[in-house]
Image (spheres, rainbow, N blue to C red):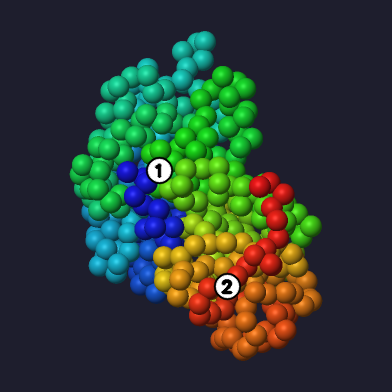
Amino acid sequence: MAQNSHKTYRNLVLYEIYVRNHGRSGTFADVTADLPRIRSMGVDVVWFMPIHPIGQLNKKGSLGCPYSIRDYRDVNPEYGTKEEFRLLCQYAHALGLKAMIDVVYNHTAHDSVLVQEHPEWFHQDENGRPVTTVPEWSDVIDLRYDDPALWDYLIASLKGWVELGVDGFRCDVASIVPLDFWLRARQEVAALKPDVIWLAESVHTSFVIDRRRRSLMAQSDGEIHQAFDLSYDYDLWPTWVTAVTDPTAVPTYVSLLQFQAGIYPAHTIKMRCVENHDQPRIMRQAPSRAQALAWTAFQAFNEGAFLIYAGQESENTHTPNLFDVDKIIWRDYALQSFLTRLCQLKKEPAQVEGQFEIVTAAPAISAVWQNEQDGLYGVFNVGGVEEVMATPLPDGRYTDLLSDRAIEVRDGEMMTPETAVILRYNGRLNTDTHRQPSRFL
């Protein structure tokens, strides 16, 4: 099951799209027109944030949140029709892309078709009114999973989208939907289409702890990977956010990455990113543009799948509003070439077949991907330093695969790059004398 996907999915590049804000008209047709450009970047999977009709009762903003869903089996008429979405998937396949949709099975809109037909499927207060178990999510109501008929309905809905051309599911707050449901859903969907990709939006550790304290169900990342191919790296996200603005925290983050690699099942694959629809843009978070690029390059080089959030290739600093029309400003696609190179490098033999190792956390993060024949050595100046650093690379001149610039290694040392460099070398590097110890291992 999920165990078989490790080598296949750890090099995936995903691209997140919110149809409402992606193009001028906010329709499937806008996205269809942009697919060739997206594919040219080296993207493998296009992930659509929820495409379903949006609830209007107790909505947020003028148009409502896409995660407040009225009907799991239909599409938002603002975007187009189900037939147009089917054709979009068909075109994506012709380009070599896979189509992934958001699955929001923890909750529905207050005016969903399910609450009208099956009010017993929802959490209720003492007065019998449907409620949410997360008070700040006031525009939704939570499903209960104690009726087998609900499981049948939801799994049948997934099958319907697979038959329409969907290749994967990004499952919203998957950690608080019963694991047994996901296991059964995966098994039944696989009987229809065996290679469907399952991405779990696993949650912050603090969220798991809070729910368990309130006697509510929440699964750890280790548990969720029994059913999923990929999960978010939100378990380390708060530490990473601190490291972005405080370089002294980078060693702690790197140590936790190494710790993370040893505490989950061997087949675990994390999805790396520097921004998504719930998080600030990296160009706003990082102290400088150079550091933003360094973090972007590191997370693309890091072990695991890599996510690009639409607009990232245009250096957007604004995170679009989910509840109103808030179009992405595309400008000149200034980072498209940079991101394209990072995406292409994920398909290098060293990354596909080799092993990943972080060598240093300071003065810059350095890491290698290597197999028996050759490897890739990356240096990522996330702290914005300017100094000489030791390197395990043999002396010589190398070509930076991100910029085509010459990089010189002399007497076992090199200058830290302004942002990041990735260098190809032959043979295997001995990193033992350069590796910095992890405080958590």
Q: Which one is earlier in the sequence, the residue at label 1 or at label 2?
A: 1
- The answer to whether residue 437 of the structure is visible from this angle is yes
User: Viewed as shown, does residue 94 lie left or right of 404?
Assistant: left
In this rendering, the answer to whether 328 lies above or below 133 is: below
Quadrant in the picture for the N terminus:
top left
Q: Position of residue 406 (x, y in %)?
A: 62, 89
Residue 160 visible in image:
no
x, y (%) of residue 170?
Answer: 41, 47
Q: Nearer the viewer, residue 119 or 391?
A: 391
**In this picture, is 375 found above or below 54?**
below
Indicate which disc residue 429 carries.
Answer: 2
Going 40% across and 53% down the picture, which residue do you hit?
6
Q: Residue at x 68, y 75 (%)?
A: 391
- Tell me the amino acid under the disc marked 2: Leu
| Residue 3 in the figure: left or right of residue 311 | left
Report crowding for label 1: few under 14, some 14 to 19, many 20 or more residues within 10 A (C-alpha): many
Q: Residues within 10 Å of mark 2 (few under 14, many from 20)?
A: many
Compared to residue 409, the image places residue 434 above or below, namely: above
Disc number for residue 74: none
Q: Amino acid at mark 1?
A: Phe
Q: Which residue is mark 1?
A: 228
Question: Which is closer to the viewer, label 1 or label 2?
Answer: 2
**For residue 352, which quarter of the picture?**
bottom left
